[in-house]
Image: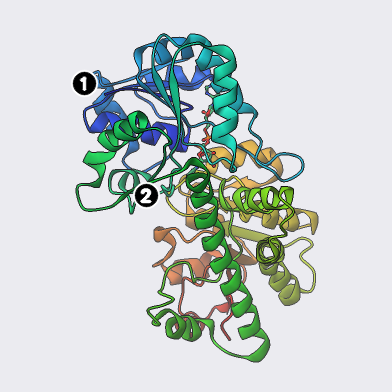
Amino acid sequence: MKIAVVGTGYVGLVAGACFAENGNEVICVDKDPAKVRMLQKGKIPIYEPGLEEMVKRNHAEKRLSFTTALAKGVQQAQIIFIAVGTPTGEDGSADLQHVLAVARDLAKAMNGYKVVVNKSTVPVGTAAKVRDVIRRETTHPFSVVSNPEFLKQGAAIDDFMKPDRVVVGAEDPRSAELMKELYSPFTRTGAPIMMMDCASAELCKYAANAMLATRISFMNEVSNVCEAVGANVDQVRHAVASDRRIGPSFLFPGVGYGGSCFPKDVKAMVRFAEEKDYEFQILNAVEAVNESQKKRLIAKMEKHFGSLKGKRIAVWGLAFKPKTDDMREAPAVPLIQGLLAAGASVHAYDPEAMKVAKGIFGSKIHYAENAYAALTGADALAIVTEWSEFREPDYGRMRKLMRSPVIFDGRNIYNPESLRSQGFTYISMGRP
Ligand code: NAD
């Protein structure tokens, strides 16, 4: 099939590469000329495991191309995916300006029947808005489909190639059949293609993300109660997770959720419910808990040291989660800002997010070449992202490098007893 994907970010580029991998002819469109030039040279602007090889291979085999010219993409394709950003607007709602701008521009370029697919995460009612915008600009026939994306950064290729399910909101048989055909190679393992109306499809994505965010905030509160009553959250979590009705995923306490999706999608869901006079009470609490959770690690540091003025703090992990370079809404950002405001100096390390961090903090913090270099002369180490390479460090080397062997672990990656037996003062989340 001939496909255009508009927006080559974490979602659009992965979707484009994976559709090409299954033999489709894909043209990826982005308005950012620097990004497109990079992609044309076989370089990818983001870190996502396995993506660069897949992009290079499909580009070389001429199934995947890149352009800034939307009209070219639209005219060559039968199915056009919109995968541009939908950031939080001033009032907390999803800002649809990029989605609607693409809809308007692609309508002007149409040269026959097209299926326009919303892959961006968009509030209920957006398919109808996109339909109206296109109708105003063209006399060609078209269908608008809603196809929310559930991939996880860090495992995006696997998630896209082998999804748990594909959700498609399609309201006419022609576009429904085309979508089923497009996705059939991705669902050979038996994952369902769930066909539904556009409003339900749009809501699925928010409900799923809001549920996951709720589990995280819930477990963070359980962890905080563990600290208050002297229980151990690891033991509580294992016992709770072994109930088959609950299961083990997304029950890890930490420093709060971040990333480009959970914070914005929780806010947007509250907002669009509110527009229909419904107050989504749980989600208001989920967000409030997350905001306060992000302050907990620094509060533990302040409690331990009295004052952080003049302290040298090593920070391991800057990305909002492992296996990505994405720092959008990353808990490391407010933590570092808090440390700087308290008069501490920060020596940070992340395996992939250093370049992004330099764009955020500039010369305000120090950037270490590796995890150990960050520890030289440190009064304490704060662990913010649970990258695999932090899990089994050389403790002897760490102790020698640090001025004082104190670890604040926001992700509970070590065993408290073994760390203490190695001579560390070890403070983690929800564990005595
Ligand atoms: P992103 O910011 O990484 O990428 C968006 C891209 O769109 C950018 O490259 C930008 O230059 C381009 N763009 C913006 N306006 C454009 C226009 N008018 N024409 C052409 N290109 C344009 O965003 P993302 O993380 O890929 O997210 C995209 C959407 O997918 C969002 O709605 C997001 O909520 C949703 N989503 C994201 C994830 C994720 O893990 N990142 C997962 C599922 C769904």
Residue 406 in sight: no
Would residue 203 be found to the left or right of residue 338 on screen? left
Residue 412 position in % (x across, y down): 51, 72
Q: Closest to the observer: 78 or 253?
A: 78
Q: Quadrant of residue 140?
A: top left
Quadrant holding the N terminus: top left
Q: Estimate how packed mark 2 is, as few (under 14), some (14 to 19) or many (20 or more) residues with alpha carbons within 10 Å.
A: some
- Earlier in the chain: of badge 2 and badge 1, it is 1
- Left or right, 323 with respect to 412, comes to left
> Residue 328's quadrant in the figure?
top right
The answer to whether the residue labelled 2 contacts the one labelled 1, judged by CB atoms less than 8 Å apart, is no
Residue 255 relative to residue 80: left or right: right
Residue at mark 1: C-beta within 8 A of ligand 1: no
Residue 309: horizontal and vertical position, in percent? 79, 62
In the picture, the disc for residue 51 is none
Please state if 238 lies on the left or on the right of 123 as rendered. left
Q: Quadrant of the C terminus?
A: bottom right
Disc 2 designates what residue?
Answer: 155
Q: Nearer the viewer, residue 46 or 241?
A: 241
- Label 2 sits on what residue type? Ala
Question: Which quarter of the picture shows residue 27?
Answer: top left
Q: Amino acid at mark 1?
A: Glu
**Residue 174 to residue 320: above or below:** above
